[in-house]
Image (cartoon, grey):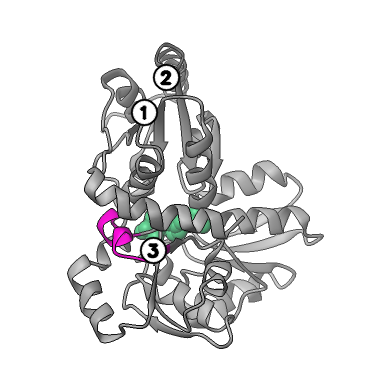
Amino acid sequence: MLKNKPEFDAKYKEHLIRKILDLKRKTNALIVAHNYQRDEVQELADITGDSYALACEVKKAVEQTIVFCGVKFMAESAHILSPEKTILLPVEEAGCPLADMVTVEKLREQKAKYPDAAVVCYVNSPAMVKAESDICCTSSNAIKIINFLKEKQIIFVPDKNLGRYVAERVPGKEIILWDGYCTVHMRLTKEEVIKTKKLYPEAEFIAHPECREEVLSQADYIGSTAGMLKYVLGSEKKQFIVGTEIGIIYRLKRDNPEKTFFVPTEQFICANMKLTTLGWIARSLEKMVYKIEVPENVARGARKALERMLEASK
Ligand code: 13P
Ligand code: SF4
């Protein structure tokens, strides 16, 4: 088997970064990256953040071309909120299995069953489903959004774990859950968390609300990726067990060089998030691919649901 020499890898990385920066200048593009992206992609990006922060950043950006290093539903939301901008997703296949667990047809059936309910749609969903919903939410504002609604009955799609987590914190509301889940966060079990806690008894356990209920019951802090970054920065603790995709560890370490982070499972990797590499970003800017465009007849309804969310979370 042929192996690259480390110095070759480093030179190639340097070459790609130079190429990207040159193309970025020529096209006047902005590169944004989700907190789960590869270390070198986060390092290169102009802005990193959770799905809520990135949606806001793209909307207020002055650049007309955005390279969105993330997954498809995020790039779709960016285009819905900023239809005048060119939104590029470097890898066309970078999707989200959770987003694919809800369809408009099934949602319509549920709406017919509960005609008085409001539909709250987690942003990890297709544009068509957003268009069929009353309001969107992300993991950082879900509780606020549900409390903002006057309806007592809520159909929450598609993540059952986030939905259940929210339901326990919004008294007086009936949350009708959908049977969707993140295939990555579902991999973590309570036993793995307990085992890791025994190894590092001083460590706090921080978890994303997409984790199983039994896992969340073990957590010292539950929140979005941005919430976790904020929590660790403000904490006096020195060790943390991280209950979300490992990409977040890049920022955790960068922001907290004196703190240590442990992963409770080796399987906390979102293959879709890891598809984006420096090579694909360079290609994206060179060929201006892949343009993510949501047809205006769908975007109109989805924009209403997303903008209502932005307004309600102010
Ligand atoms: P955040 O909203 O925390 O960015 O999470 C998005 C996501 O895909 C979680 O799996
Ligand atoms: Fe989708 Fe889960 Fe990957 Fe997030 S971590 S993008 S919810 S598959």
Residue of label 3 = 184
Circles 2 and 1, Cβ within 8 Å, touching? The answer is yes
Q: Position of residue 148 (x, y in %)?
A: 56, 70
Q: Nearer the viewer, mark 3 or mark 1?
A: 1
Q: Is residue 180 magenta?
A: no
Q: Position of residue 104 (x, y in %)?
A: 21, 66
Q: What residue type is labelled 3?
A: Val
Circles 3 and 1, Cβ within 8 Å, touching? The answer is no
- Tell me where residue 115 sits by quadrant: bottom left
Q: Which amino acid does label 2 sit on?
A: Ile
Q: Position of residue 23 (x, y in %)?
A: 40, 15
Q: Which range is magenta?
A: 125-135
Towards the viewer: 62 or 255: 62
Q: How far apart are marks 2 and 3 (CA)?
A: 30 Å
Which mark is first along the chain, 3 or 2? Answer: 2
Towards the viewer: 143 or 250: 143
Q: Which amino acid does label 1 sit on?
A: Ile
- Outermost residue on the right side: it is 236
Q: How far apart are marks 3 and 1 (CA)?
A: 24 Å
- State whether residue 101 is above or below residue 218: above
Residue of label 1 = 281
Q: Quadrant of the C terminus?
A: bottom right
Q: Is mark 3 within 8 Å of ligand 2?
A: yes
Q: Is mark 2 on a helix, strand or loop?
A: helix
Which mark is first along the chain, 1 or 3? Answer: 3
- State whether residue 236 is above or below residue 109: above
Which mark is first along the chain, 1 or 2? Answer: 2
The mark found on residue 20 in the picture is: 2
The mark found on residue 247 in the picture is: none
At 32% from the left and 34% from the top, the residue drawn is 90
At 53% from the left and 39% from the top, the residue drawn is 57
